[in-house]
């Protein structure tokens, strides 16, 4: 084979590998992705529901390829706001909201909403 043929074969192989690698990489949502849910863990004199917060954190960790979790502490007794961001479709987000409401059904002193703003 000639040098030109070998170079063309190498280049073609190299470019096909690059294309495959980028096609397999998951799309990561960024910090600028829209907020689809905000959860406020508040306290009435005895701290927040730590187990509820941990459940939300674990849920978000399982969906780390699709969801960005942002926590903002705001009080003296561990109060925190959790904002969840994603670039996914509305149907998937509605399913996630249902999941989160189920996870937090027995949690104390927390508010879940699908507001589009987060405490800074």
Image (cartoon, rainbow, N blue to C red):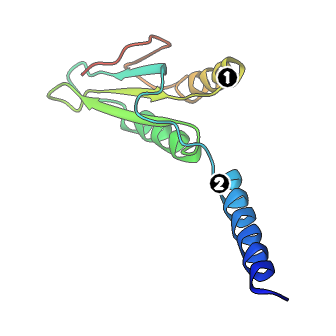
Q: Is residue 18 left or right of residue 77?
A: right
Q: Nearer the viewer, mark 2 or mark 1?
A: 2
Q: Label for residue 89?
A: 1
**Front-most of residues 49 and 25:** 25
Q: Is residue 113 left or right of residue 80?
A: right
Q: Earlier in the sequence, mark 2 or mark 1?
A: 2
Check disc 1 and report its element: helix, strand or loop: loop
Q: Label for residue 103?
A: none
The percent coordinates of residue 103 (x first, y second) are 57, 30
**Front-most of residues 36 and 4:** 4
Q: Residue furthest right?
A: 1
Check disc 2 and report its element: helix, strand or loop: helix
Q: Is residue 116 above or below residue 54?
A: above
**Front-most of residues 49 and 27:** 27
Q: Label for residue 22?
A: 2
Looking at the rendering, which quadrant does residue 5 occupy? bottom right
C-alpha distance separating marks 2 and 1: 22 Å
**Front-most of residues 27 and 62:** 27
Q: Residue furthest bottom?
A: 1
Residue plotted at (18% across, 25% down): 75
For disc 1, the neighbor class at 10 Å (few under 14, some 14 to 19, many from 20) is few
**Quarter in which the N terminus is drawn:** bottom right
Residue plotted at (70% across, 63% down): 15
Residue plotted at (55% across, 40% down): 59
The percent coordinates of residue 91 (x first, y second) are 72, 19
């Amino acid at each position: 084979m000639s040098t030109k043929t070998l170079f063309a074969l190498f280049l073609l192989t190299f470019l096909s590998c690059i294309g495959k690698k980028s096609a397999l990489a998951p799309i990561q949502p960024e910090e600028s992705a829209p907020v689809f849910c905000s959860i406020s863990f508040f306290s009435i004199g005895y701290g927040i529901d730590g187990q509820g917060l941990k459940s939300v954190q674990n849920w978000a960790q399982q969906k780390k390829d699709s969801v960005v979790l942002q926590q903002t502490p705001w009080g003296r007794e561990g109060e925190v706001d959790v904002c969840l961001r994603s670039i996914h479709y509305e149907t998937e987000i509605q399913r996630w909201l249902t999941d989160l409401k189920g996870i937090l059904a027995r949690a104390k002193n927390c508010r879940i909403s699908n507001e589009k703003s987060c405490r800074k």
